[in-house]
Image (tube, rainbow, N blue to C red):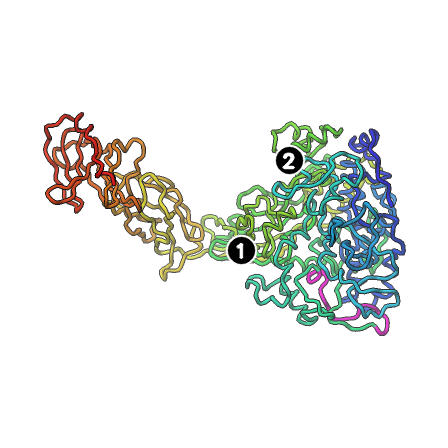
Amino acid sequence: MRKAFPTSVLYLILLFSGVALAALVVPTDIEQPGTQPGEVGNLESPDKCDNCHGGYNTAVEPAHNWRGGMMANAGRDPVFWATVAVAEQDFDGSGDLCIRCHSTGGWYGGRSTPTDGSGLAAGDADGVDCDTCHKMTNPDRTEHAGVMNAPYIANDEQTPATGYHGSGMLALSNGNAKLGPYSDAAAKHQFAKSNYHRSVDFCGSCHDVSNPAVGDLAHNNGRQPTSDPVTANGTPGSPVAGKAAFNNFPFQYGIVERTFSEYKAGSLSKTPITSYASLPADLKAGAILKAKTATDVAGNKYADGTTRYFSCQTCHVPPVTGVGANKSGTPTRTDLPHHDMTGGNYWAADAILYQNTQNTLRLGGGMTAGQIAAVNAGKTRAQQQLQLAASMSVNGNTLKVVNLTGHKLISGYPEGRRMWLNIKWYGPDNSLLREDGAYGPITATVNGSPTQVKTILNPDDPNTRVYEAHYGMTKEWASQLISLGYSSSLALSYDRVTGAVTKTLGQLAAQDAGTYHNTFHFVLNNKVTMDNRIPPYGFAYDEARKRNALPVPATQYGNAGPGGTFNYWDAVTLNPPTGAATAQISLMYQPTSWEYIQFLYLANNKTNTFLANEGTNLLNAWLNTGMAEPYVMTTTSWTAPPPPVKLAIATQPGNGVANTTLSPFPAVVAQYGDGSTASGYTGPITLAIKSGTGTAGAVLNGTTTVNAVNGVATFSDLSIDSAGIGYVLTATSGGITPADTTPFNIAFSGVPGKTVTSPSASSDGTVYYGATDGVLHGVSASTGASVFYVDTRLLGAFNGARQLLGRPIRRPWQGVEKVFCVTDDGYLGCFGLDGSTTFFEKIPLSLSSVTAVPMAQDDVL
């Protein structure tokens, strides 16, 4: 049982001074619920497990496959150690949070203090070891009881309880039995069946990661703005009982990684394998197809009748046929869990093996031939996982990238990870016209010398599509940190070429309220500033909002909104250069970028002797192992579509009102000769008023030329300035056959500067208006459509500036309903509802008396 750290002036000075003195007692700001160090015994070395579970069939045996993945090598991982070095500088004691998941045996064995890892033993390099997983119990205490002593209870303590699944808040059994999914194991050790080991919550225990310090101390608790409020104390060093980690679910605060939440917010988490046929056609491929195929042999249900879902285990611990141990009598199973456990990090294997040869592994050096072979095999499996993760297809000038995983594409710890589109455009002679998303060498300053490193050459190019998550710090949090004693000169970011500091904590604190800055200081970051990674199938807004897993901004991928579901694909509008005939499109993935390597190298201030060289060691490993050479996940191609031959009106404009946006929005489609849409056409399409229609001199306002998208141009802001009957718009685009809209009418709008007389309503539902331009209008009161339109300037004695005065008056005359109006030059107009027109000479009335003529009550009905 660890001691709660007391609040004291000395504690605050050490915690926030920037002096890298590894904590001997873990700060309460870092502590989390669950089994604590020293509370569980009998944690055996994986070497002992190898005696039975390895050495007989590398294709299926648990030992070889586990040893090849990053779970077994988490304690060796050079990126982990370089990150811990910076984290310990940023928040003394935070290394405990990292060690908790990267060296579980060391952590539960009580060797995570000092928190820089200097107390770990050589055997603690084996990361998430066998006994940790096979002693895990559900923290809701519905099955085997794990050790949890108050206040370190990893559930909400309600009835029934809901467990805390995340950030390594494990509840370990203190018994001798190994827990697993079978009740009929032929084992030499004690065992017990555990339903929890088939639950996705089992995986969520480590694959949602939250920062308890930021969750408790930062002004926004490190959560997304739309998520639920967090219960937190907010005072450094205060007792754990009031801390965010002890009063909220792990997904509610301090976002670091949300792989499990991404999965839980998607539909695959609720989809039985038997429902594979009901999935969309473009999902029946890759990892989803592989999962279904594996269960065709293993069965759609487990041996005990439990329904199989598209779960974490389905992809990362898939069923295989074989035996789980090398002892006689071990049953052959068709649903043996393959301890694959690989994601997409293929480069970590190269870094580990390089440092092993250089004797610079912080833990776990002197690897055996078997371990090396396992790591190389794990690298191959990681690359295979990437090949199963996505598909691409092209329709015209639209590229569709489909996520075939159960989480975001890409997922996992986001710092330094990125996926992007590399597109090479070729002319008819196969000459390269342009390359989007080009990756190659730049000359950066390293150790004061110019050094060639590789990265995305122009990540800000609008034609380059990069998928990644960016984290950062807010101005408000920066100000908080300075008030707590952090140095205002703390470097937040560096120029990727020169290495010069581009922003400091003090500069961020001096910015405007509500601003932020991207940085790789993961233990201090309190904001997801951007996340455009592709959501999984059925990604629900409401669940993602609750779990702090929304895209940023949340308007991407269909802008789902409350109650909605995001798209599981990205539709990318391609922008071919002039003259392009073909293109080769590759989806690239890189687990560790130059920018992240550079940060971990430069940000290590070497004040911690134990970790002083970890940034340099990582840099050397990266430079000498291909610089984490990007891996091609999948490819497709583009061919220039043939040009369209004609235009057609996809959406006709309706009757409208002058100076008001046409509705519905007119839309024009480019077509081939057979009438099909030329979806690859992106050329400009123009709309104009057809000569001889509507009112002479009328102007079509708004954006009259729009570039087609997928062959369609939509005009969303057009209006016509003059009322009229029978307007027709003509669509043109270069030499393509034009198209006309159907006729439509525009009613008088009554905008200022036009109407000088009050309206007169009649019993037939028509409202009459006189206008300053001498035009008399009749408009349907119910529909707004123009039903009557006369230009008085063209009648009687010519007067191009003639205007109407007074109200138009409706009166029966000679047995016919007429509308009378008077012009400013003294003429009287008489207009029949049947279209007949009489225009009288000047009448012997003063204009003042005409304008003063009142309307009778029966004129306004």
Rounded to the nearest whole Å, what is the CA distance between mark 1 and mark 2? 31 Å
Q: Nearer the viewer, residue 585 or 378?
A: 378
Q: Nearer the viewer, mark 1 or mark 2?
A: 2
Q: Nearer the viewer, residue 671 or 849?
A: 849
Residue identifier under label 1? 400
- Percent coordinates x, y for residue 795 in the rendering: 14, 37
Residue occupying the far front of the picture: 857
Residue identifier under label 2? 517
Look at label 2 and name its amino acid.
Answer: His
Q: Nearer the viewer, residue 372 or 681?
A: 681
Please state the extent of the stretch shown in magenta in the rendering: 313-329
Q: Nearer the viewer, residue 189 or 448?
A: 189
- Percent coordinates x, y for residue 734 in the rendering: 35, 49
Is 328 in the magenta?
A: yes
State which quadrant residue 792 falls in.
top left
Quadrant location of the C terminus in the rendered image: top left
**Residue 636 located left or right of residue 595:** left
The answer to the question of whether label 1 and label 2 lie on touching residues, with beta carbons closer than 8 A, is no
Question: Can the viewer see residue 380 in this picture?
Answer: no
Q: Which type of secondary structure does the marked residue at label 1 adopt?
A: strand
Q: Which type of secondary structure does the marked residue at label 2 adopt?
A: strand
**Residue 573 located left or right of residue 833:** right
Other residues around mark 1 within 10 Å, as few (<14) / some (14–19) / many (≥20): some
- Percent coordinates x, y for residue 64 in the rendering: 80, 62
Q: Which mark is residue 172?
A: none
Question: Can the viewer see residue 723 in this picture?
Answer: yes
- Percent coordinates x, y for residue 288 in the rendering: 63, 62
Look at label 1 and name its amino acid.
Answer: Lys
Other residues around mark 2 within 10 Å, as few (<14) / some (14–19) / many (≥20): many
